[in-house]
Image (cartoon, rainbow, N blue to C red):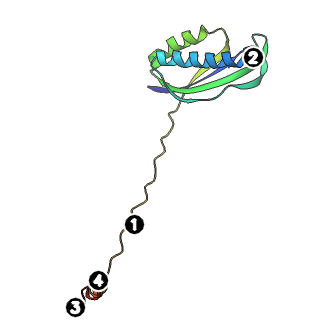
Amino acid sequence: MNFYEIAYLISPEIEPEKIKEIQKEVISLLRKQEGEIEEETPPLKRTLAYPIKKQKEAFLVSLTFWMEPSKIKNFKKDIEKIKEILRYLIVKKKAPKKILEIKKPAKKPKKVELEKLEEKLEEILGTKL
């Protein structure tokens, strides 16, 4: 499996509830192709540098995911069928490095000197050994 990121622009004319539905639809298409989602960003309204399909603003959403390279082509075809998506871009990325937890060495119990141990025993038992 390879690590990918998809960024897509959703038309600003759509209601917020519909945007969530589109996000769920993209995720279901991804899972249909046996992809695994790593991270999802919430939609952000952005002003575009130039108009896309006569729109000057759009909602930007991005997803990072794992997928087999052979299934990306089908995923792209499925994304293109969603009319509310103005434009999308899928990029292959380097896999994120896993952060390992640093384990602190366990504290060793303090060694008790033999003489002190004998003194304590004498106090407890009341006799000399």
**Mark 1 residue type:** Lys
**Mark 4 residue type:** Leu
Give residue 39's quadrant in the image: top right
Q: Nearer the viewer, residue 4 or 59?
A: 59
Task: Answer above or below: position of 10 versus 111.
Answer: above
In this rendering, position of residue 49 left or right of residue 87: right
**Mark 3 residue type:** Thr
Q: Earlier in the sequence, mark 3 or mark 4?
A: 4
Mark 3 or 4: in front is 3
Q: Residues within 10 Å of mark 2 (few under 14, many from 20)?
A: some
- Residue ID at (55%, 13%): 76
Q: Which residue matches tag 4? A: 117
- Quadrant location of the N terminus in the rendered image: top left
In this rendering, position of residue 52 left or right of residue 89: right
Q: Earlier in the sequence, mark 2 or mark 4?
A: 2
Mark 4 or 1: in front is 4
Residue 123 x/y as whole percent:
29, 88
Structural distance between the alpha carbons of marks 3 and 4: 14 Å
Residue 127's tag is 3
- Residue ID at (51%, 36%): 96
Pointer 3 and pointer 1: residues touching (CB < 8 Å)?
Answer: no
Q: Which residue matches tag 1? A: 107
Q: Residues within 10 Å of mark 3 (few under 14, many from 20)?
A: few
At numbered mark 2, what does the secondary structure look like: helix, strand or loop? loop
Q: Which residue matches tag 2? A: 12
Q: Nearer the viewer, residue 31 or 55?
A: 31
Q: Earlier in the sequence, mark 2 or mark 3?
A: 2
